[in-house]
Amino acid sequence: MTVHPVNFLQAGLLTLTLFGLALTWPQREYRMLQVLLALVTASMLFNLLEEVGDLRQVYLVTPIFLLGVGPAIYLTIRQLTGQLPALPWAWHFLPMLAALPVTHHTQWVIAVGTLSRLLYALLSVRLILRFHQTLQARRSDAEDLSLNWLAWLIGAFALLGVLDLIRLNLQPYISLKINLLGQTAGTAASLALFAILIYQAVQYLHQLQFLRGEQHQEAPPTSLGTMSTHTPPAPDNEIYRNIFQSLQTQLNVQHWYRQPRLTLLDLSQLSGLQTRDISRSVNLCTGLNFNDYINRLRVEEVKRALSDNADQNLLSLALEAGFNAKSSFNTAFKKHLGMTPTQYKQSLQS
């Protein structure tokens, strides 16, 4: 029995995923994350049994897990974003089980597994983009709830998969030492990425609980301009301009945009207007989505305050205007004015 440094890392990843399972087990909202962690746990266990024990001499199992990681990450993202899969989740793992009898064709299984990971990575990124569009249309704090960190993790996992495929295909031409070095580096990177994934996913699901309730509360509104079922509805730009003018007047008087987590549904309830009509009128009259429109109002308030007194603290002004983080304030300010808040303040002082 020969033990290599990579085996200690595999044991570390096994321990990490078991800890993640113990941490999340009671909650149903973590179910897909638990499936992913269970899959990685099984993968590391079989890796140790094959490399430290004698299982490799009996049967090779580990290549099939390449066909399971992609679907597991994809389904985890669907749960994180509240989008139910079209098919029962277990169906996504049928190719992994189907590969079990043919693992002696190792290179082919690895190649198909890598393609599967890349395909699911693309599907995952598309899910994240759609989720971001939904947030932008409904929430003024969309940036705080974004999944950019997850998109970067998916890219890193996909890159690791490609590099591992290259290493495995080069095995006949490289020394055992270089092969083990590559495997050690890949396992160390996976350990770090899964630690980040577990921490961020648990934190994010806690943060996202209130969104789930909001999605169930909101019913499809009836837009102003809806006609009989026999006549297709035609958008009336003048009606939407009047709606926008009413909305703008109320916002200027009531300053509802100062609520850090203002949503489209909140604004509908406060103003008495339908969510669809608010969204349509804002888009028609400003060319902006809900998130950008509310942030523009906040930026304008900060600008007015700086015009009165350019020596005021930027972060204090941002918080008073409705921003709940310095990063989201800086991003919105630069997006609407083309410069950072500090640069704008310096231009006033000079």
Image: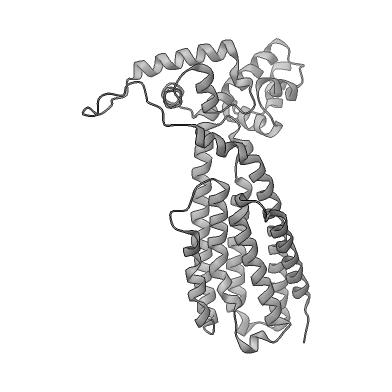
Which residue sits furthest bottom?
Answer: 57
Q: Nearer the viewer, residue 65 or 22?
A: 22
Can I make out residue 168 in this image?
A: yes
Figure quadrant of residue 278:
top left
Q: Residue furthest left?
A: 230
* Residue 209 picture quarter: top right
Residue 44, position as x, y percentages in the image: 68, 71
Task: Give the side of residue 200 with respect to residue 262, left or right.
Answer: right
Lateral position of residue 330 relative to residue 126, left or right: right
Please report the residue visible at 62 percent of the width from the left and 29 percent of the height from the top. 261
Whether residue 154 appears in this view of the structure is no
- Report the front residue among 77 and 162: 77
Q: Is residue 4 above or below residue 153?
A: below
Give me the residue at 49% from left, 16% from top: 247
The image position of residue 168, as x and y in percent, is 60, 77
Residue 350 image position (x, y, % from top left): 73, 17
Left or right position of 55 against 108: right
- The percent position of residue 277, horizontal first and vertical second, equals 42, 23
The answer to which image quadrant residue 304 occupies is top right
Colouring rule applied to residues: one colour
Q: Quadrant of the N terminus?
A: bottom right
Q: Nearer the viewer, residue 22 or 83?
A: 22
Whether 307 is drawn above or below 49: the answer is: above
Q: How many marks?
A: 0
